[in-house]
Image: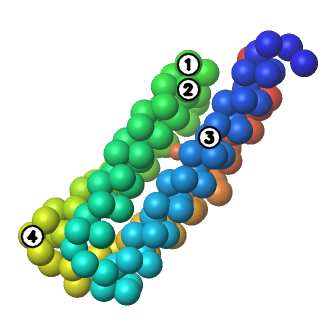
Amino acid sequence: MSNIAEFNAASNADTDREHEIQLGLLRALCKAAGENRDAAAIGEILDRLIAYSEAHFASEELLMRLKSYDDYEDHVEDHAQMMDTLRGIAASHAEGDPSLIAGRATELLGFIGKHIATRDRRFADYVRNGL
Ligand SMILES: [Fe+2]
């Protein structure tokens, strides 16, 4: 295997791992909100999820630029939408309104799941087959 092929395979493995952590945090948020856990517990998961998502999206976007990826704009738009939703959930949480968190987090889980299965899958194929 060439060095580039090894780099590409390692990049995809890293991205898969990051998706599992991101989805795990989001599932934990859905569960905590669904069980009406206390505000501090929900806030902690939310903070970790936001920080992790920022870092994960930034690294994915850097790799897309490095690879001159052809679907960069639309892909980044999805990431921006997900961060807006997360920050909206955090704002509701900070205002002490927990009523909508579970529903919005579950909706976001669907959106991110679809994003990973479509846009991220396409990028992984592009990376695997590219230079
Ligand atoms: Fe992505």
Residue marked by disc 4 = 95
Determine which residue is flagged by label 2: 63
Residue shown at the point (72%, 29%) measured from the top left: 10
Mark 3 Cα-neighbour bin, 10 Å: few <14, some 14–19, many ≥20: some
User: From the viewer's perspective, is 63 left or right of 117?
Assistant: left
| Mark nearer the N terminus (2 vs 4) | 2
Q: CA distance from mark 3 to mark 4?
A: 34 Å
Residue 127 is drawn in which quadrant? top right
Circle 2: is it few (<14), some (14-19), or many (20+) Cα within 10 Å? some
One can see residue 83 in this view: yes
Q: Is residue 55 left or right of residue 122?
A: left
**Structural crowding at the residue carrying mark 1, measured as other residues with C-alpha within 10 Å and reported as few (<14), some (14–19) or many (≥20):** few
Tell me the kind of residue under disc 3. Answer: Thr
Whether tag 3 and tag 2 are in contact, CB under 8 A, the answer is yes
For label 3, the residue is 15
Labels 1 & 3 near each other (Cβ < 8 A): no
Residue 77 visible within the image: no
- Mark 3 vs mark 2, foreground winner is 3
The alpha-carbon separation of the residues under discs 2 and 4 comes to: 36 Å
